[in-house]
Image (spheres, grey):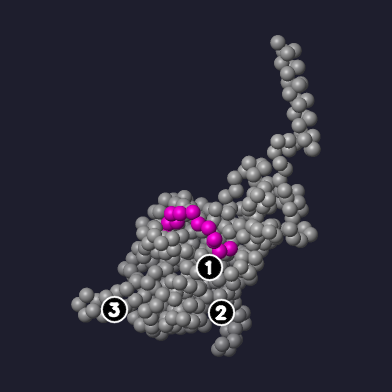
């Protein structure tokens, strides 16, 4: 019985290992299209931004709202201004910078229930 | 050091900072200039208290302030007056005996002791150090206790999904909102949209400024002219004062 279980586990691990190989990881689910529209570098290294952008935003939102500190570096407005799509002017939508990754990772994105996902320069230029 | 002693020293430091801020070398010439606009790295400070003075005798029969406010903050009417958000409104008063009619703009009065903050179960309703009363919509659960507690009926609940928000004024369904004294403009060193509109298109009835700043026009006028608070009996020490009421 234990021998059979060991074989099954080994088989499962082998399949999982193969699936984890980078080119196959996304089988069945399209990889997110991360289009960088503007600028050479973000406000922090890419790895840090991928892991911690939500922490940076959470920290900044309380500083801005409660203390009135409107530092642009980690502000949501700053994120949207750089990362909005050239075509739509938004970080949401099919290939939107925020929504494509969040859909891939199945993490709900609540920021834009209240905040505007539109780039401001573009919005201002509209009639 | 016990807490009382520490607190006492804290007050001393605050008082010294306050004294330094208004040190004058000669009339009209300060050692340290009172800055109107803070830098983005500087937190809102209790040395300032933002307020409004509204002279009702000059308040014309227009709604420039209401239009400007709702335009600035992206508060669009959905054509349902019972549930539409209202950050500022014109109130018409008429003496029943004499028929004498007055009109005045009414919005969040930015109280020193705000009842909305007292009742908020999550701490979402709060007063910023410079006296501006705000709602932290990240923590607002939409219970509407503050709507009931406010004696001025200044708060609105957002009943429907919102789109087309302004970048500086996030708004969303299920939260409570009210006049922010255009906090995003104040932080840039500008005056609220209603005041700007009133001085441009209206009766020049509204004045914005720092109630604590001895050199501010609003401070001088409040000191030398009669003014009143709405529901002064509640002793909330409102930041919005009226003249000619």
Q: Which residue is mark 3?
A: B101
Rounded to the nearest angstrom, the CA distance separating label 3 from label 1 is: 32 Å
Specify start and end residues of the magenta stretch as a single range.
B156-167
Name the element at disc 3: strand
Which of the marked residues, 2 or 1, is nearer the chain's N terminus?
A: 2
The answer for which chain carries disc 1 is: B
Rounded to the nearest angstrom, the CA distance separating label 2 from label 1 is: 24 Å
> How far across and down, in percent of the image, does residue B176 sit?
45, 57
Frontmost residue, B223 versus A116: A116
Residue B22 circle label: 2
Frontmost residue, B65 versus B53: B65
Closer to us: mark 2 or mark 1? 1
> How far across and down, in percent of the image, does residue B112 sit?
43, 66
Q: Residue furthest left?
A: B97
Name the element at disc 1: helix
Q: Is residue B99 magenta?
A: no
Which of the marked residues, 3 or 2, is nearer the chain's N terminus?
A: 2
Q: From this viewpoint, is residue B48 visible?
A: yes
**Where, by quadrant of the figure, is residue B35 drawn?**
bottom right
Residue B183 circle label: 1
> How far across and down, in percent of the image, does residue B62 sit?
39, 78
């Amino acid at each position: 019985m234990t021998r059979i279980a060991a074989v099954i586990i080994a088989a499962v691990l082998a399949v999982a290992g193969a699936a984890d190989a980078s080119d196959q990881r996304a089988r069945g689910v399209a990889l997110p299209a991360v289009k960088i529209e503007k600028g050479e570098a973000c406000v922090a290294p890419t790895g840090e931004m991928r892991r911690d952008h939500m922490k940076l935003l959470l920290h900044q939102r309380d500083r801005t709202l409660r203390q009135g500190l409107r530092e642009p570096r980690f502000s949501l407005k700053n994120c949207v201004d750089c990362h909005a799509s050239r075509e739509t002017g938004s970080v949401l939508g099919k290939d939107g910078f925020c929504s494509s990754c969040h859909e891939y990772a199945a993490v709900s994105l609540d920021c834009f229930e209240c905040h505007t996902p539109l780039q401001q320069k573009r919005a201002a230029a509209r009639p | 050091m016990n807490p009382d002693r520490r607190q006492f020293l804290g007050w001393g430091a605050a008082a010294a900072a306050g004294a330094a801020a208004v040190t004058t070398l000669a009339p009209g010439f300060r050692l340290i200039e009172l800055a109107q606009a803070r830098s983005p790295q500087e937190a809102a400070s209790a040395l300032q208290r933002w307020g409004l003075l509204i002279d009702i005798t000059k308040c014309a029969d227009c709604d420039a302030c209401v239009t400007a406010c709702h335009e600035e903050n992206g508060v669009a009417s959905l054509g349902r007056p019972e549930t539409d958000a209202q950050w500022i409104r014109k109130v018409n008063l008429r003496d029943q005996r004499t028929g004498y009619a007055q009109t005045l703009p009414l919005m969040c009065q930015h109280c020193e002791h705000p009842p909305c903050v007292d009742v908020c179960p999550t701490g979402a309703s709060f007063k910023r150090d410079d006296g501006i009363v705000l709602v932290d919509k990240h923590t607002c659960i939409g219970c509407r206790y503050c709507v009931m507690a406010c004696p001025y009926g200044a708060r609105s609940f957002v009943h429907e999904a919102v789109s087309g928000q302004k970048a500086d004024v996030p708004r969303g369904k299920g939260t409570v909102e009210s006049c922010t004294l255009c906090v995003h403009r104040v932080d840039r060193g500008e005056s609220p949209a209603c005041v700007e509109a009133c001085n441009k298109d209206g009766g020049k009835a509204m004045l914005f400024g720092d109630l604590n700043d001895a050199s501010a026009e609003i401070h001088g006028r409040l000191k030398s002219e009669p003014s009143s608070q709405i529901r002064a009996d509640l002793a909330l020490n409102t930041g919005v004062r009226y003249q000619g009421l």
